Image (cartoon, helix red, strand yellow):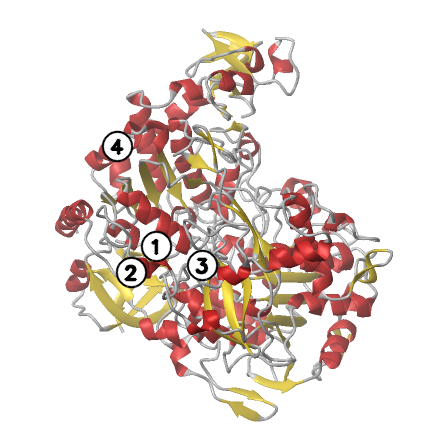
Amino acid sequence: MKTSRRNFLKAAAALGATMAVSPLAFGDITQKPIPSWTEGSPAEDTLDTDPSVSFIYSTCLGCRSDCSLRGKVKDGVVIKLDGNPYSPMTLNDPIKYSTDPKEARKVAGKLCPRGQAGLQILYDPLRVQQPLKRVGKRGENKWQAISWDQAYKEIIEGGNLFGEGNVEGLRSVRDLSTPIDPEAPELGPKANQFVFLAGRIENSRAELVKRFVNNSFGSINWFEHTTVCEQSHHIATANTFAGKGHLKPDFENAKLIMNFGANYGEANFPMNGLSRKLADFRIKGGRLITVDPRFSVSASHSDEWVPILPGSDASLALGMIQWIIDNKRYDKSFLEAPSKDAAALRGESSWSDATYLVRTDNGKYLRGDEAGLGGTKDDYVVLVGGTPSLAAKANAADLVGEASVNGIACKTVFQLLSERSKERSLDEYAKICGVPQEQIVRVADQFSSYGKLAVADFYRGPVQHTNGFQTGRTICILNMLMGNVDHRGGYQSGGSTLSYMGDKNGKYQVAKLHPGAVKMTGIRISREKAKYEDSTEFKKNGYPAKRPWFPLTGDVYQEVVAGCIDGYPYPVKILWLHMATPAYSIPGMKDRIISAFKDTKKIPLLISTDIVIGDTTMFADYIIPDVTYLEQWNALGAPPTILGMVADVRQPMTHVFPQAKSVENMFIDIAKKMNLPGFGDNGFGAGMPLNKEEDWYLKLVANFASQYGKIPGATEEAQVKYILDRGGVFDSGGAYDGSMMKNKVASLCTIYAEKVATTKDSMTGKNFDGIPQYYPVRDAKDQLVKDDGYDFIATTYKQAFHSHSRTISAPWLTEIQPENFIEMNNEDGAKLGFKDGDMVKVSSLSNKEGVKGKVRLRPGVRPGVVTVCASYGHWHYGAIDSVIDGKTVAGDKRRGTGVNINFALRVDDSIGNVCLEDKIGGSCSFYDSRVKVERA
């Protein structure tokens, strides 16, 4: 492999230097105007002047970006989709918010292929059009169409629904007084045996369903999907930047961006807006370094490509940190300011813990009341010229130092970081990464040459590993060393939004308008946000727990499913899936999940709300037809790439199938039939009904109006109409405050994660580490996962024209690329005797049957890695025939093409029934599995 690796690294350097062209590129980076035809729709469109065509503003959900959307609707039929020209999500220079909607018809915002294909998702002939009840056994894909009344009655009341014995319904399970286990009362009441698990449920839609599940039904078990997406990114960022879970570069003013696997131009959201901003960044001469084992679109437009081995990002970042510290290329002024006041003297809005003393005995910050300095438990302690002082009284403190303070041994945070970075040599870091030592030095030098105008960015790629949280933290700390947080051109928390729930001076504080609200109690089925040490199990058995507990994270999707399968920490009675397909999406778990979901003893009642019969939905007892996003309501904000103010509204453009119903209206109906608090004629309080989704959403839009304070109209109704006529509230101005961002973190930012360092791992009894570290792939019991004989590391990525599992139903998108491939380095393929198009099998130690697909050989995949783009490899989602009311509904075989490599990935055999995972951030490991590739 040495020759191959050497040749590959030479080629990678050449590719980075020449910025070789790739498919779906950003465009020419030369300094010239962008052609007008790229600005949206053609200048002349007869629909714009046809008075019979209505323009309805909404929000896209072709991917996670939630781009502002506009539909052209005639006779109730949506015939064209565009970007919303009022919104900075779709135009760098949107029209003024005050522009009359009649004038706005003449302008269109940008919309990507996924957005355009929303029409085909809306009018998909294979959509579920009315409630379906299974006939026969789970998974036989035979259904009976039933009425809404029957569906509601059976789901609520239960009974001998399938001739297989009695099944408890929602009414029986909603028992708030009987404990699940009297010997373990901390588990909570029987009501917790109802579990709601969503794949994609956003913002105010999520809030209404939480209102039902958590505060009306009384179950603690409401979840969404974040750990199969990027949760460790959010948790790592929040543990560095004062609870802010998502920051982005200020693309308009940054000079250098080092992109760790964020996949600009293909997946990282908002794909539309971010791609435009990155193109402008490059046109203005901004430097881009991309760290990724795949030569991605981002890499093709970078000044340098760093093709590291998957999972070694922390090693690269720690090598850079070592070099930056040794060469004193960090922002000393920012780091040595120990308080808000000291930071303000330096023109900073945020400050760091770099100078704070950490106790070496218990891993906590030394506090003033322990130091004998007359302080309190809330005071931090620093060294000033080697002498202990309260941080609040120091204008500058020592970065390096260790001392015994009042008999307590301590070191500064910066010293701990420096020591951690020096635990390995640069040569050792380089060998772990699989890149030359001189490249680590070069990128560290370049990065630190731009000061506050250099930003390290990351998203899913570096964190969906067993070391994901710690990796994310190392990348965050690169920004801390540059002192770039809150700075124009630095790392920033984005524009502003308005609180749809009204908790920021809104007219309707919706969460509080809940008479009779139930206070949920107990332990979640995923054991998240709870400490194992507080459980009866711990008192009886000590360490290890049966399965990991996750006190530092939430929405641990894969462990919700594992908890249901294992009945741990208690058995589930009802599982409600919404827009969720765990069998398709959780790495390595397809066959295990299908087997469990077929078992009516493990999950007695399984319900799914979906728009099609999906890959996991097909194993449900009932499929309840949801509406598509073009028929939905929602209230949303914007990701931090977009500056200014964005408060988007999604509103229905049409309603295609009369018997399809939004999940909001479903739960409102069920709540009313069960007489649950917070719904019905007095749902918000006396005389304030919550009988339909509009009762909810129009209050949220009114909150936008009351908070913004600039909406014309003498009445609430007039102001709401003004907002809906523009698709939300948008204000592109005021993103900056001199040399700073207007919207700031403005808080203590931490290199040391004290909460992490003082939390124990439920599987080992050891504390987690508060200073970021690199470690190789480990299972839940901290055993190294080596898998000798499996010579490749499997990874996945997303393309610009597909999202997750949902866009395969759009022919416009599948025509672009009808199938996907198992991609690998051409030299690796040649050694195995492969040619393009050969059928190969990819398998892992725990999934030896593996998956089969066509191989594609390319130099843009580093040796030792195989990669497969997501969204293909369905076994249903309309790909096969279904039987409804005894009649066969023909499927569309095009939806079943290609391969999903998730099915071949590694399971954590040390605990079973789950993929490898990050025990701190909670993320699934998508990029750690070692696999074998052989001819099929």
Q: How many marks on residues?
A: 4
Q: Earlier in the sequence, mark 3 or mark 4?
A: 4
Q: Work out how far the residue at label 4 is from the one at label 2, CA to CA, in angstroms.
A: 28 Å
Residue at x 72%, y 54% (from the top left corner): 716
Q: Which residue is mark 1?
A: 265
Work out whether mark 1 precedes mark 4 in sequence or the reverse, and give the earlier one: 1
The relative height of residue 457 versus residue 800 in the rendered view (above or below) is above
Of callouts 1 and 2, the N-terminal one: 2
- Residue on which the image places disc 3: 907
Mark 4 — residue?
Answer: 446
Using residue 431 as the reference point, say whether residue 646 is left or right of it. right
Instruction: Confirm or deny contact between disc 1 and disc 2 (CB under 8 A).
Output: yes
Q: Nearer the viewer, mark 2 or mark 3?
A: 2
Q: Is residue 508 left or right of residue 111?
A: right
- Judge depth for marks 3 and 4 and give the one in front: 4
Separation (CA) of disc 2 from disc 3: 34 Å
* Image coords of residue 276 (percent x, y): 36, 51
